[in-house]
Amino acid sequence: MAKPKFAVEGVYTAVLTPMTKTLDPDTKLMAAHCRWLLANGCDGLGVLGTTGEANSFGLKERIAILDALAKAGIPGTRLMPGTGCCAIPDTVALTRAALAHGASSVLMLPPFYYKKVSDDGLFAAYSEVIQRVGDGKLRICLYHFPQMSGVPITYGLIEKLLKAYPKTVVGMKDSSGELANMTGAARNFPGFAVFAGSDELLLPLIEAGGAGCITACANVASVLAAEVFGGFRKGKDVKAVHRTLSDVRRTIAQFPLSSALKTLMARHTGDDQWLNIRPPLVRMSAADKEKLFQGFDAIGFELPMAA
């Protein structure tokens, strides 16, 4: 087996969080979904991220989700939980909980309420978290998603963090949609694991030295992403598979990702529990659902057998 190029790499799913009728996390269904993903090509699980509606959950709820997944036997080493919160103490508490369950890394948004903050301010925030957690096992992937957070992760900030914490800050998920930003980070910071947040950019990023992807659509297309990543590493021509993966992404991205993916999972499993979603997000309309199904079915890709 080839030696890993990065501290973390491969295909990670930005895992959905199924909910009960009362809009509480359905951790039993979530654990089953995690097992299905790991059985179908995923190297890791990005739980408690944007697609998982993490910012619609309180701190206690998020920690309870991690506890429940551990109790259900989901390997902590396969988890990359989202732990970035607006308040430093919340980020510290959630990060400690992730490490307590053996998480190999965490995905950390910057504090995202205050806008137009300086790199010095963001460095101080990340540094404060690292110092307070105080655990040599901590591995952080920064989360660059300026469209949602309003707080970009700049090359200058990455450089400062790598200089101060070279063994702790190991990578970045880039959900900006800007390939040049991803390839530039991979080029400028050797050994820094850059993950694409979009399936369409997986192949061009790993061709440029990237580490893989962490994507929403891997909830339904992890087998395709795994074939692209693994095939590329073995020197295979994976362009056709990547085109199919990109078609899946473009079709689903016409709609709000969490509700569209939950709708697909409900159809695939026959379990309408998947349709539950916490406000302010809402279920898909009947018309959008029909459009989604028509577009998805036209691709010709079939999901693996349901868990």
Image: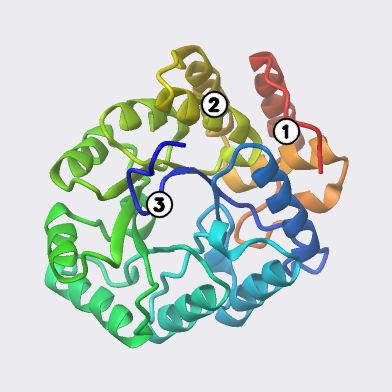
Give residue 110's position: percent from left, percent from top: 32, 67
- Mark 1 or 3: in front is 3
Which residue was labeled with disc 3? 8
Q: Earlier in the sequence, mark 2 or mark 3?
A: 3
Which residue was labeled with disc 2? 227
Q: Looking at the image, can residue 190 be seen? A: yes
Report how far apart the C-alphas of labels 2 and 1 lie in the structure.
Answer: 28 Å
Report how far apart the C-alphas of labels 1 and 3 lie in the structure.
Answer: 36 Å
Give residue 75's position: percent from left, percent from top: 63, 61
Left or right, 130 with respect to 224, comes to: left
Q: Looking at the image, can residue 254 be seen? A: no
Identity, as a three-letter code, of the amino acid under mark 2: Glu
Residue 289: mark: 1
Front-lying residue, 81 or 232: 232
Residue at image position (33%, 48%) is 6
Left or right, 83 with respect to 175, comes to: right
Identity, as a three-letter code, of the amino acid under mark 3: Val
